[in-house]
Amino acid sequence: MPDSSPPSQAATLTRKRPQPGERRAQILQTLATLLEQPGGERITTAALAASLQVSEAALYRHYASKAQMFEGLIDFIEQSVFALINQIQTHPLDSGPRQAGQIVTMLIRFAEKNPGLARVMVGDALLLEHERLQQRMNLFFDKIEAALKQCLRGEAGAPSSAPPSAQARAAVLVAFARGRLQRYARSGFKRLPSEQLDSCLALIL
């Protein structure tokens, strides 16, 4: 006859222990949440471990360094944003300026909904961290600018090099977006980046 006694406490705790992939995701989610706290203090691994109620050694079993944790957040930002850009660009009936406006709007609203990630995007959370992290975010915005330039280039049969007006408008749009996100992060997330967004984009485009 099978044993119908309740499982031991040890067995229950074993089943509840997160899988490695789940723990990695939990670490990144907690890091992003800590970055949402106004004030801009640098997040230490000790503070992160305390929030997760684990030891710092437990963190390093999943990530070799704090820089790797930030790279995980950057990976999420890149995958999310560029997947949405691809969706916007698959609507050929939309005009170039309309697509460009949609990309900037998406970028700003993504950051607005993820305040901790906004601090990563503008580099505030990366101060005193490894230099390659800021380089990745700079490259991220370079890719955004390239996508905007492609939208503003005109018809599919246009020359491969974008006209100066498209280059200039793409650069201005990226500078505008980065400025809005920086103001959002440095205001303690009080100045929403989407304030009068449509009117501002109409002026630029």
Image: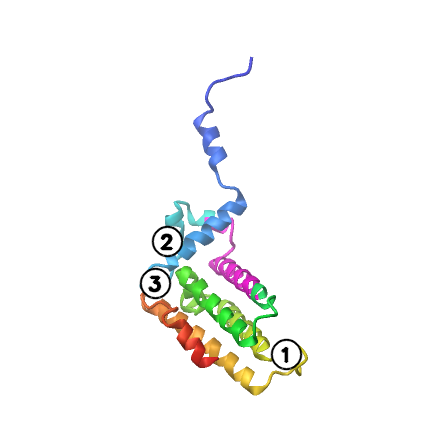
Find the distance from the CA under tag 2 to the CA under tag 1.
52 Å
The circle drawn on residue 41 is: 3
Residue 66 in the image: state x and y as whole percent.
Answer: 47, 58
The circle drawn on residue 155 is: 1
> How has the structure been colored for display?
rainbow
Q: Earlier in the sequence, mark 2 or mark 1?
A: 2
Looking at numbered disc 3 in the image, what kind of residue is underneath it? Glu
In magenta, the rendered stretch is 59-85
List the residue tagged with mark 2: 47
What secondary structure is marked by label 3? loop
Mark 3 Cα-neighbour bin, 10 Å: few <14, some 14–19, many ≥20: few
- Which image quadrant: the N terminus? top right
Find the distance from the CA under tag 3 to the CA under tag 2.
11 Å
**Residue at 46% across / 29% down in the picture?**
10
Looking at numbered disc 1 in the image, what kind of residue is underneath it? Glu
Location of residue 198 with respect to 52 vertically, above or below: below
- Whether the residues at callouts 3 and 1 have beta carbons within 8 Å, the answer is no
Looking at numbered disc 2 in the image, what kind of residue is underneath it? Ala
Find the distance from the CA under tag 3 to the CA under tag 1.
47 Å
* Residue that sits furthest to the front in the current view: 93
The circle drawn on residue 128 is: none
Q: Earlier in the sequence, mark 3 or mark 1?
A: 3
Instruction: Give whichever of 87, 185 is nearer the camera.
Output: 87
Q: Which of the 4 image quarters holds residue 82?
A: bottom right
Residue 153 in the image: state x and y as whole percent.
Answer: 60, 80
Residue 192 in the image: state x and y as whole percent.
Answer: 35, 67
Q: Earlier in the sequence, mark 3 or mark 2?
A: 3
Mark 1 Cα-neighbour bin, 10 Å: few <14, some 14–19, many ≥20: few
Tell whether position 113 is magenta: no
